[in-house]
Amino acid sequence: MREVVLRYLDVDFGNAGSTTHRYGTDARRAVERARTQVGAVVDATRGEVVFTSGATESNNLAILGLAEYGQSTGRTHIVSTAIEHRAVMEPLEVLAERGFSVTFVQPTAGGYVEPEAIARAVSDRTLLVSAMHVNNETGVLQPVAEIADLLADHSAYFHVDAAQGFGKHLPDLKHKRIDLISISGHKLYAPKGVGALIRRKRHGERPPLSPLTFGGGQETGLRPGTLAVPLIAGLGAASELAASESDQWTTRCTAFGDHLLKALAPLKPTLHGDPNRRLPHIVNLSFPGLSNELVIDATNHLAAISDGAACTASSKVCSHVLAAMGIGADEAAGALRFSWCHMTDEPDWPAFVEVVRQLRPTFTPGRVT
């Protein structure tokens, strides 16, 4: 994949919008090939793929892009979940300020929403249902295929933020009742700064999105601006590799996770999220009595771990995801997110355990320090 990106950075540096010469034509071919590669992961056609800067932009385009249609038809109700990424939550807050009503379905204690709870929240006025594919903090798989089944006879558009699961958990996103799918390149080891929105046709028509930016007409008018050919080509190559190497990825990540949990068992961690629904590359846990900040500072020479989603970790605010799952503030204050990939080298687990064990005298039982 690296070679693909460098080729369109160093050698074939044409503009995909300038097809009157060979350089532009070659760039256009690279973009269309990538469109096919991305769409193939979810059984979408090339014409259903819109390239963006990442899942955040895709989420905004999917949600805010439907607002004009919703207002014109009187369908101003949206159903989502209480554990969505901020890139979904904040556009929904914008729509609420514009007069839309939003119902947030609460998750179970295991960190997933019940499909029937989503279905019960839908009404004749519902324009959109938005539910993530895999939770970015806990790694828990959401029942998007089951939700899609329950929406079969409803006209509401169904959007899935698949940033965390695209190319990793393959079957669910192929469901034809999912209208809109947001993805990010860097979650597939493609370059940062590129992603896509799948806009799947239903009954021959695409979801009626309005653009959020203007000028240029690229991407069927939905996302104007010169296309980032090297990044798009990299996303296409990464998507194809993810689909073809899915089994190897799962095997390697599962083994890593098994080693991690076995190594940390002496510390008696508390796991957050149903382990039977968790994808094999993320685990969220806490060590009773220890704050996440204390553990991160003490172990940063051994492992790169975080206290939540990368985009919200700097805020030092306890996770809205864990709170929605019913996890108390003290326990949430100790929550750590471990994530890895098939290429991750295992750290020195015995040394990690010993460092955390030595932190134990620094806390008072029943209190997080």
Image: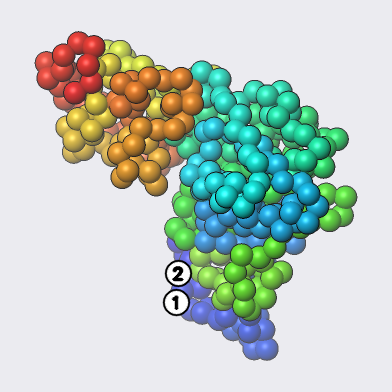
Can you identify the residue that label 1 sits on? 10
Residue 82 is at least partly visible in this image? yes
| Residue drawn at point x = 53 percent, y = 78 percent | 12
Q: Position of residue 76 (x, y in %)?
A: 72, 46
- Foreground pick, 92 / 339: 92
Q: Nearer the viewer, residue 211 or 193?
A: 211
Q: How dense is the environment of label 2, judged by Cα within 10 Å: few (below 14), some, or many (20 and up)?
A: some
Residue drawn at x 30%, y 21% is 330
Identify the residue at horizontal 12%, vertical 19% (top origin).
362
- Secondary-structure class at tag 2: helix
In the displayed structure image, the side of residue 194 where residue 318 appears, left or right: left
Quadrant of the rendering where the C terminus is positioned: top left
Image quarter for residue 322? top left
In percent of width and height, residue 297 lies at 18, 35
For this orientation, the residue located farthest to the right is 203
Q: Which residue is mark 2?
A: 6
Which amino acid lies under the numbered mark 1 shown in the image of this protein? Answer: Asp
Q: CA distance from mark 2 to mark 1?
A: 6 Å
In the rendered view, would you say 204 is above or below 329?
below
Q: Label 1 near label 2: C-beta < 8 Å?
A: yes
Query: Residue 11: x percent and y percent?
Result: 48, 79
Amino acid type at image mark 2: Leu
Residue at 51%, 65% in the rendered image: 231
Residue at the farthest top position: 365
Residue 46 drawn above or below residue 302: below
The kind of secondary structure element at disc 1 is: helix
Asked whether residue 46 appears in the rendered view, the answer is no
Displayed quadrant of residue 2: bottom left
Percent position (x, y) of residue 270? 36, 16
User: 309 left or right of 208?
Assistant: left
